[in-house]
Amino acid sequence: MNYRRLGHSGLEVSVVGIGCNNFGRRCDLNQTTAVIDQAIEEGINLLDTADIYGGDGASETLMGKALKGKRHQVVLATKFAGQMGDGPMSKGTSRNHIMEAVEASLRRLDTDYIDLYQVHFPDPETPLEETMRALDDLVRSGKVRYLGNSNYAGWQIASAHWIAKQNNLSPFISAQNEWSLIKRAVEDEVVPAAQEFGLGMLPYFPLASGLLTGKYKRGEMAPEGTRLAEGPMAERSLTEANFDIVEKLEPYAVERGHTLLELAFSWLASHPAVGSVIAGATKPEQVTKNATAADWILSSEERAEVDGLTQ
Ligand SMILES: NC(=O)c1ccc[n+]([C@@H]2O[C@H](COP(=O)([O-])OP(=O)(O)OC[C@H]3O[C@@H](n4cnc5c(N)ncnc54)[C@H](OP(=O)(O)O)[C@@H]3O)[C@@H](O)[C@H]2O)c1
């Protein structure tokens, strides 16, 4: 496993991470433990969850149990801002909600510190300076070690940077946004802003929910038990336009002795802005495959060819 500093920080993360939004929903405690144990075995250290994953904190709760005695081996990343109860103060990025949300996450994760605490979504109703000051207090208190954002626009990344700089507050070191060979909009504004202001990118949905593993085929039923076998995600992902892209990328990878899965990971990982590719997994076997999938270092020529195929 290769490791990188996340953004302009001292935090070292594995180039392949684990997204934990399956835990508590599609994975029970046994499966969650098996996936996490395999990740540690493969040298993966970054585990990314959120208070809302699994519903009502279930992902964090299972992770707290699965990580008993192993907490120090992982970089634990979680997020807040999603709705976690009733009433106006149970969501968002106000000082009030941040102070409650962090205590609840620490309790569920059964830990006394969070390595990377991320704003899950921007909150247009709370001044960014209030959010940055509350988050800085968490860093100074030791409850949180580093800060990240998610789903921010490029201008919000810039704005947060200058607020932190002018007020001597802890800066964001990571930006988590949807980014894959299927969804590339983030490359216009967010990735340049992240590079300019020292944030490492943590691309989410890197496998387009599994489409970029090659296990879904045009005109065929999705394999039973897979994420895209049914539901709104399937409609969003298994489109004719997406299959057009997949059917160009897969032969491109195979001709070069790789798989589509390896292209999906390696194309992201070989971008200089990327800190870690946090793919979700439901089985230890997937973790093993994914752990080496970012090893192909794409040349600039290959990146240009892939650009051509995904336009
Ligand atoms: N910040 C945000 O707003 C936000 C939003 C979404 C996600 N995220 C984060 O990003 C992470 C990654 O996103 P994601 O898990 O939703 O999507 P993803 O990584 O694009 O896809 C994950 C799915 O791909 C399948 N898969 C993974 N490895 C495989 C392999 N080797 N072979 C076959 N299938 C494989 C699994 O499907 P099956 O389930 O079919 O086994 C898994 O559930 C999340 O877990 C979460 O931490 C963040």
Image (cartoon, rainbow, N blue to C red):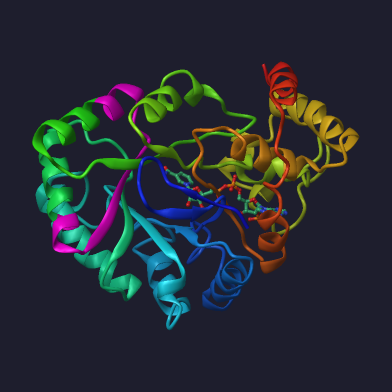
Residue at 74% over, 21% down: 301
Above-or-below relation of 154 to 256: above
Image position, residue 52 (x, y; %): 36, 56
Q: Quadrant of residue 173?
A: top left
Quarter the C terminus occupies: top right
Above-or-below relation of 33 to 232: below
Query: Number of numbered discs present?
Result: 0
Image position, residue 203 (x, y; %): 51, 40
Residue at 43% over, 23% down: 192
Q: Residue furthest bottom?
A: 69
Magenta extent: 138-158
Residue at 11% over, 44% down: 133
- In the image, is 52 to the left or to the right of 286? left
- Residue 203 vs residue 115, the one in the foreground: 115
- Residue 133 vs residue 55, the one in the foreground: 133
Above-or-below relation of 199 to 22: above
- In the image, is 226 to the left or to the right of 11? right
Q: Is residue 232 visible?
A: yes
Q: Residue furthest front?
A: 10
- In the image, is 46 to the left or to the right of 151? right
- Residue 132 vs residue 213, the one in the foreground: 132
Image position, residue 218 (x, y; %): 81, 34
Q: Quadrant of residue 206?
A: top right
Q: Magenta includes 190? A: no
Q: Is residue 126 visible?
A: no
Residue at 48% over, 58% down: 46
Above-or-below relation of 25 to 214: below
Image position, residue 11 (x, y; %): 39, 53
